[in-house]
Image: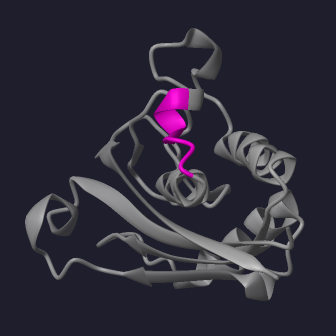
Amino acid sequence: MTSIRIGNGYDIHQLVEGRPLILGGVHIDHSLGLKGHSDADVLTHAIMDALLGALSLGDIGHYFPPTDPQWAGANSLKLLGQVHGLILDRGWRIGNIDSVVVAEQPKLKPHIEAMRDRISQVLNLSPDQIGIKATTNEKLGPVGQEQGICSYAVALLTSNS
């Protein structure tokens, strides 16, 4: 009998000058970047929270607290690899992930394939198991006013136990 679990995740970070913009492990040319303790990759953070949530393992702040200097500037794809290890250690595997990044600028469509490739490599998945969509907030709220970027994700985990 196969068991399944789903989890959802969300993350938002403020856009600021002097920081790189990294989404899904991809450096994107933009005049602003995301402010955060790590590399502030909201897409990867939302995916990590979805994976952890599926198994009731808390959130990324529990494993990688922003108060801990060892995570300063951390590459979120490396953190994702550690979260994946927690999933595998408990006898689960990822069925698929679906996500959306909400940003007014820059346009993300040209970068989605590279994001899927990077995330799928870290998780040892086929790129078609990683859904990434991009949308705007139609100029509404802080994301719509280009004060930040957010991401939502859902993950399906399966177990054969």
Q: Is residue 71 left or right of residue 59?
A: right
Between 52 and 109, the residue placed more toward the observer is 52
Between 5 and 102, the residue placed more toward the observer is 5
Q: Position of residue 155 (x, y in %)?
A: 59, 71
Residue at (21, 77) in percent of width and height: 137
Quadrant in the picture for residue 16: top left
Residue 73 colored magenta? no
Q: Position of residue 37 (x, y in %)?
A: 47, 27
Q: Quadrant of the C terminus?
A: bottom right
Q: Is residue 19 left or right of residue 155?
A: left
Q: Is any part of residue 132 visible from this angle?
A: yes
Furthest residue in direction bottom, as rendered: 128
Between 20 and 99, the residue placed more toward the observer is 99
Q: How many marks?
A: 0
Residue at (46, 22) in percent of width and height: 66
Q: Position of residue 82 (x, y in %)?
A: 77, 40
Q: Is any part of residue 29 visible from this angle?
A: no
Q: Quadrant of the N terminus?
A: bottom right
Relative vertical location of residue 63 with respect to residue 116 in this rendering, above or below = above
Residue at (44, 81) in percent of width and height: 134
Quadrant in the picture for residue 14: top left
Q: Is residue 124 left or right of residue 33?
A: right
Between 68 and 8, the residue placed more toward the observer is 8
Name the colouring of the figure. Answer: one colour
Q: Is residue 147 left or right of residue 34?
A: left
Relative vertical location of residue 69 with respect to residue 109 in this rendering, above or below = above
Relative vertical location of residue 116 with respect to residue 63 in this rendering, above or below = below
Q: Position of residue 2 (x, y in %)?
A: 79, 80
In the rendered structure, which segment of residues is drawn in magenta? 56-62
Relative vertical location of residue 19 with respect to residue 33 in this rendering, above or below = above
